[in-house]
Image (spheres, rainbow, N blue to C red):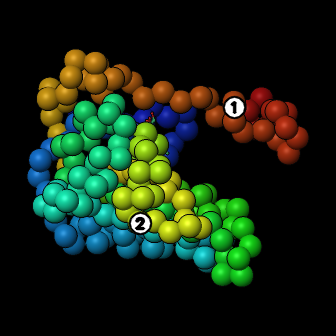
Amino acid sequence: MEKPADTEYPIHDLLRRRWSPRAFGDRPIEPEMLLSLFEAARWAPSSNNQQPWRFLVAMKENKAEYDRLFNCLVEGNQTWAHRAPVLLLSVAELQFEDGSLNRHALHDTGMAVENLVIQATTLGLVAHQMAGFRIDQARGDCQIPDGYEPVAMIAVGYPGNPALLSDRLRAREVQPRVRKPVTEFVYSATWEQPLPLFR
Ligand SMILES: Cc1cc2nc3c(=O)[nH]c(=O)nc-3n(C[C@H](O)[C@H](O)[C@H](O)COP(=O)(O)O)c2cc1C
């Protein structure tokens, strides 16, 4: 199923087509595709080229590892994410080498994830990011050291059949994708002053 964005202004087709489905197919992801996703993440820009992102990877073939990430998900996400063949956990390194705070660590980790998600779209895969997971459990079970922050779980796989979702989730799956209008979040160089372009 596709849900391309209904845009106000033209954007690249990949950006229109990326979305966050809950219906995943059972088909595993080919290893070379998975490697392409991480290569895409690798080339994200970052403050001071610090590359603060890390990815923990769990494939369904390895049940112990898959369950380790899966069991951290809140139940609402488990109900659909269990079909995804791969679960990722993005983690941000919070400090520079000299110990000072990297206040763009989460920003840059999100950039790497967006690269990964867009690469997934080019390969016919889908990815769904999740904030709904137990952070302390992930920290403990995955042995994430101090100074690193678990950021988001990401379910990755091939698109699946929405008919396999519960009635409630299927209804959400087919709802149109909505966004604020551009004018609501783009200002001139003074807070909340409209950009003349929009007048
Ligand atoms: C950081 C982040 C956390 C999210 N957490 C969840 C989540 O826990 N469960 C869920 O079903 N969707 C989650 N989403 C998906 C968003 O709800 C989704 O991106 C948003 O509704 C826009 O829809 P679209 O991605 O299809 O355009 C998350 C997305 C992001 C980027």
Quadrant of residue 65 within the rendered picture: bottom left
Q: Pinpoint residue 77: horizontal percent, then vertical percent.
A: 33, 36
In the image, taking residue 182 as reference, residue 112 lies left or right, namely left
81 shown above or below 51 = above
Q: Secondary structure at mark 1?
A: helix
Using the image as rendered, state which of residue 73 and residue 50 is in the foreground. Answer: 73
**Mark toward the viewer: 2 or 1:** 2
Q: Quadrant of ligand 1?
A: top left
Q: CA distance from mark 2 to mark 1?
A: 44 Å
165 shown above or below 80 = above
Q: Secondary structure at mark 2?
A: loop
Label ID, residue 143 = 2
Label ID, residue 183 = 1
- Residue at the image position 82 percent from the left and 41 percent from the top: 188
Q: Are marks 2 and 1 in contact (CB under 8 Å)?
A: no
State which tag comes first along the sequence, 2 or 1.
2
Quadrant of residue 48 within the rendered picture: bottom right
Q: Pinpoint residue 97: horizontal percent, then vertical percent.
A: 66, 81
Q: Which quadrant holds the N terminus?
A: top left
Disc 2 crowd rating (10 Å Cα; few below 14, some 14-19, many 20+) is few
